[in-house]
Image: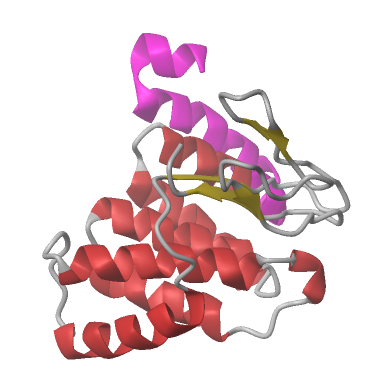
Amino acid sequence: ARRAQEFGPDDALKALSSLVENAPGDGVLARDVGFAAQEWGLGGQAYHLFRRVAASRPHEPQTYHAMALCLEDLGNADLALAWYEVALAGQWNARFGAFRQILGQDYLRFLRRVEAGGNAISVPEFVAERSHAIRSEFDAGPADLTVTIMWNTDGTDVDLHVTEPTGEECFYSHPETRLGGRITQDVTQGYGPEMFRIANP
């Protein structure tokens, strides 16, 4: 973080990438470095790190989701669309909780942006068809605020807590609030994701 601030993100990523070079088989480390690259605005480098992780750990759906989000940020809508579809088509272990639901909502947001002209795409007919199907399966209504967390250590439990302006807290044992905030199911075995949504924050 200090290198990123002092010398820029490219220099910081160069320093971090030495960790990946020293442990090329460590998918968790590579994904951590990918998240750092994405945070620093280096989506192209992040994508290639995530792609490497997906090749070595194809059973972890969050990597496909990360690739789709990364490519969406880069403006590569065609490839983002493909990775959303791969992640959606997978038969993932139940321990990943509401992954499919959260992915579906992100995918629907992406498709709506493409339909509104926010991203150029070469298959507009496919987007229109998929948008209808995804909307009918995953549309959870309007949400002006969405908060999603995922983590990168397996066998751990991280919990999303959101405290609303009224002081009411939304979390795993209080999943719905009086203002209409809702949280997805609690994921206790690693990676997540968990999502909070509210229509009128």
Front residue (pair 26, 174): 174
Residue sitting at x 22%, y 57%: 75
Q: Look at the image and name its color scheme.
A: secondary structure
Answer left or right for 78 relative to 96.
left
Q: Is residue 43 above or below residue 16?
A: below
Q: Is residue 101 above or below residue 185?
A: below
Q: Is residue 87 shown to the viewer in this render?
A: yes
Q: Which secondary structure is most common in the magenta stretch?
A: helix
Q: Quadrant of residue 114?
A: bottom left
Asked if residue 155 lies in the magenta stretch, the reply is no
Indicate whether residue 7 is drawn in magenta: yes
Query: Which residue: 61% across, 83% down?
Result: 90
Q: Which residue shows up at 43% across the image and 64% down it?
A: 141
Where 27 falls versus 17 (above or below)? below
Residue 48: % across, % down: 44, 57
Residue 43 x, y percent position in the rendering: 36, 47
Q: Where are the magenta residues, as a range?
A: 1-30
Q: Image point 31% across, 81% down: which residue? A: 131
Residue 4: which quarter of the image?
top left
For this rendering, which residue is in front, 52 or 105?
105
Residue 136, position as x, y percentages in the image? 43, 84
Q: Is residue 180 above or below residue 107?
A: above
